[in-house]
Structure formats: C-alpha cells, structure tokens
Image: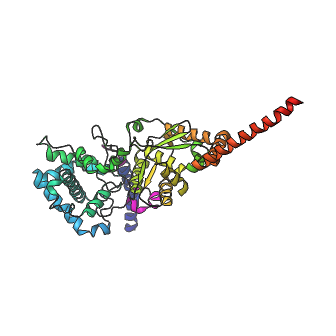
C-alpha cells in the first residue's frame, strides 16, 4: 500500500518536472543573442549533389568537422596547429591565460554564431577556438611577410598542403566567426599601431580570389566564406532593388536559341564583376567567367551561405540562375566560349554545362534583383518577335560567313542584272506596240 502511494506521489511530480523542462527550453530561445547566426551546414538536399565541395581536405576549423575521423588521423596537421599556436604566443607576448580568458568572455557569442547547438563542454569548446584562431592568425601573418618564413615554415615547404589549407578556409562548414580572429589579433597587436589590420592581412592571404581588387576599407564580414562572396559583389549589386520572382523566370531561352533569334552576345573585357550584366537593343553583354576546378567549390559555398543567411539578397544565386537558363547543353557553352564570355580549364564544354546546371539544383529563389528580371523579360520579348527570327534566319543562311556573304552578294547582283536585262529587252517591244 505504501509503495503505491509513493508511486502516486512520483507520478504527480512528473508533470511539474516536464513543465519546468519545457519552460527552460523556451526561456533559452528567448534569451537575446548578441550576434546573429552566420555559420551553417549546407542543406542536405544541396550537399548530396556534391559533398566534396563542402568537406575540408586536410584541416578542421570550428566544431562541424572537429570529430571527422579522416581529419583527426592527420597528425601532422594537428601538430602544425600547435606549432603555430606556440609561435603566435611567443611572437606576441600574450599568455595562454590572456587568450583563454578572452575566448571564455566571448564564448556565448561564438556559440550563437553557429546555426545548431554545439555539443562541446566549455573547456573543449574554448580549446578548439583558441587553437584554430591562433593557427589562422599566425598563418595569415606569416603569409603577409612570407620572405621571413619561407625557409622553415611547415606549410610553405609543401605548396600542395598550403593550397589545400587555403581551400579549406573558405568552406562554409569550416569557419570561425570573424570577430574572434579580429579580436585576438587586435589584442596581440594593440601595443604596436604600425601593424596592418587583420582585414588587410586577410585580403592579402586571399588576394588571388579577389579579381576586382576590392579594397578592405569599409568591408565588414561574418567569416571567410562571406569575404569570398564580397569579392564577387560590386557596389551596385549591394544596393540593387529586388522583386518577387514571377512567370518571367519560369522560362528563359538558351544561348543557342537566342542566337538563332538574333541576340548578340558580347564579352565585357573591362568589367571584372561577374554580376554586371547589360542588355541593350538585342545585345547581351556579360563579364568573362573563368572556370577552373575550384569554381564549383567556391560558388557552392557562397550560394549555400546566401540561401541561409541572405535569403533576400541572393545576388550570386541570381547570376547563376540566369546562367543556368542560358546554358542547357555543351552547344550553349561553346557559344559563350566562342564569344569570350566563358573560359575554361576543364577541357570539356559538357562538363561546364553540367556544373552550371547542378549549381542551381534544389535552390529556393523567391526573389531576384530587378535588373536581371528586366533583362530576362526583354530577352524573351526579343526572341518571341517573328521579325527578329526572320532576320536572324536570313543572316544565318546567307551572311554568317565571308564565303556565304560573297556568294549571296554575287547572287543578288546576278538577279538584279538579269532583271535589268529583262526589262531592257521588253521595254522596246512595249514601246513599239
């Protein structure tokens, strides 16, 4: 009897415990976050298309790939991280206590930057951030003053490894919040105002990815994937008005179809910003896109970041969506290569077409910048005018090569001369009658 009463008491207490548990979870949600989420895993339906594009080759940064057994097995890379940490502390005069204390102060803000709950105890989390952040800062500073380090640096001695590390540092799932790197760097250099800013040395490290030579002044970034994205943007893209995607984007004719309708494609050799498309009176002008074996990786990570963080400012996704419409086959790629709009090191036009089409698979595109929507609409309208197709067909059949042009002109001259001769023959007979 007593046991039953005890069970009853326990059962009565369970609802209260459950209510408290749920209330605690709700309260956690309501706590204000100092920083917005900015580091995400690529959406599963997008990641499955090309998992390699989001996966580090040699080094884990941050928590998402921390327990990856393949990366953990690379003992030399773990050793290099610690060598760089030791060098950072010795070179700056900071103590481990200084760095740990600062990261502990930022811990909640750092965790809030990740779009999922990081299941690491406080000490493990702080240790991870400390080692990864100091590694990156030391690496960037050595690269900034490379002549001093070329001889004895464990990365510079192996160019392939240094390249793989640089590749891994721009992946969306492999990031630390930028404010951590900048804060530790400022803590280390505050006594010497002659040091460049961390943004300056970041730009130096990634200079090969900055074809527009964008200056660091006034640039604010969340992390290195965001920095890579900003290298693609121009000032006009950042201010471009957007509009809901409508029926216009249900279909846009491919490059080969537009060529047949008389649209002229022209490469903009002066503009380094890929996104600056222009359309004027049947001429579509596009900056040159250089395609290499890293192009898909860079664009995939930028697009994944845009989809999660900038759903209303997906400017790189906008560009790829237009390119996806223009390219349906290797013939479309060949046209754009012939016009100087695409250059490729892949060696296969079909491979380029597949890459572009796969980049836009499973993406949500609720809006687009108004300039692109206008260009799409004008291209559709141009294609659907029968007169344009007739003119384009005439040019294609009779005037698209020097030989055809010469033959056509000769034929026209013969027809005209024959007509004149006929008139001259008939005219006296008419007069005589």
Q: Is residue 58 above or below residue 137?
A: below
Question: Residue 406: image x %, image y %?
Answer: 61, 46
Q: Residue furthest right?
A: 433
Name the residue located 34 percent from the left edge and 52 percent from the top edge. 114
Depth check, front residue: 361 or 104: 361
Q: In which image quadrant can residue 331 be found?
A: bottom right
Q: Is residue 33 left or right of residue 400?
A: left
Residue 84 is situated, as x and y percent measured from the top left of the image, at 17, 58
Reply yes or no: does residue 229 show up in magenta. Answer: no
Question: Magenta stretch?
Answer: 28-55
| Numbered label tally | 0
**In this view of the protein, can residue 364 be seen by the observer?**
no
Q: Nearer the viewer, residue 239 or 160?
A: 160
- Examine the image and state in which quarter residue 52 appears: bottom left
Specify the quadrant that holds the N terminus. bottom left
Q: How is the image coloured?
A: rainbow
- Relative to 415, is 72 on the left or the right? left
State the residue in front, 262 or 308.
Answer: 262
Q: Can residue 129 be seen from the camera position used here? A: yes
Prevailing secondary structure of the magenta residues: loop
State the image coordinates of residue 119 (x, y, percent, origin top left).
31, 59
Q: Nearer the viewer, residue 25 or 12?
A: 25
Residue 321, x across and y down, in percent: 50, 48
Q: Quadrant of the C terminus?
A: top right
Compared across the picture, whether 344 is left or right of 79 comes to right
The residue at 54%/49% (across/down) is: 325
Which residue extends farthest bottom?
73
Q: Against 17, is 70 above or below?
A: below
């Amino acid at each position: 009897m007593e046991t039953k009463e005890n069970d009853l008491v326990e059962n009565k207490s369970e609802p209260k415990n459950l209510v408290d548990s749920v209330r605690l979870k709700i309260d956690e949600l309501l706590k204000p976050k100092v920083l917005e989420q900015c580091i995400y895993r690529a959406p599963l339906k997008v990641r499955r298309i090309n998992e390699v594009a989001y996966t580090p080759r040699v080094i884990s940064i941050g928590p998402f790939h921390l327990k990856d057994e393949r990366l953990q097995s690379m003992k030399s890379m773990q050793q290099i991280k610690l060598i760089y940490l030791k060098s950072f502390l010795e070179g700056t005069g900071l103590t481990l206590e200084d760095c740990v204390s600062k990261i502990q102060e930022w811990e909640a803000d750092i965790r809030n930057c990740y779009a999922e709950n990081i299941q690491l105890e406080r000490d493990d989390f702080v240790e991870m951030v400390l080692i990864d952040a100091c590694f990156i800062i030391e690496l960037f500073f050595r690269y900034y003053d490379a002549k001093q380090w070329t001889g004895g640096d464990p990365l510079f001695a192996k160019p392939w490894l240094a390249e793989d590390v640089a590749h891994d540092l721009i992946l969306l799932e492999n990031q630390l919040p930028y404010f951590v790197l900048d804060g530790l760097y400022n803590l280390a250099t505050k006594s010497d105002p002659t040091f460049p800013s961390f943004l300056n040395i970041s730009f130096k490290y990634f200079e090969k990815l900055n074809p527009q030579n964008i200056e660091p002044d006034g640039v604010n970034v969340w992390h290195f994937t965001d920095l890579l994205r900003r290298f693609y943007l121009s000032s006009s893209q950042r201010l471009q008005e957007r509009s809901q995607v409508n029926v216009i984007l249900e279909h846009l004719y491919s490059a080969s179809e537009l060529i047949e309708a008389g649209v002229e494609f022209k490469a903009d050799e002066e503009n380094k910003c890929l996104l600056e498309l222009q359309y004027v009176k049947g001429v579509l002008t596009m900056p040159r896109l250089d395609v290499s074996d890293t192009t898909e990786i860079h664009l995939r990570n930028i697009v994944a970041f845009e989809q999660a963080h900038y759903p209303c400012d997906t400017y790189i996704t906008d560009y790829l969506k237009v390119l996806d419409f223009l390219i349906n086959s290797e013939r479309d790629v060949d046209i754009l290569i012939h016009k100087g709009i695409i250059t490729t090191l892949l060696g296969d036009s079909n491979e380029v077409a597949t890459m572009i089409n796969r980049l836009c698979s499973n993406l949500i595109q609720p809006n687009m910048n108004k300039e692109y929507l206008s260009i799409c609409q004008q291209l559709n309208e141009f294609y659907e005018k029968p007169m344009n197709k007739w003119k384009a067909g005439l040019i294609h059949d009779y005037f698209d090569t020097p030989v055809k042009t010469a033959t056509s002109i000769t034929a026209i001259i013969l027809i005209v001369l024959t007509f004149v001769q006929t008139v001259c023959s008939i005219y006296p007979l008419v007069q005589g009658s």
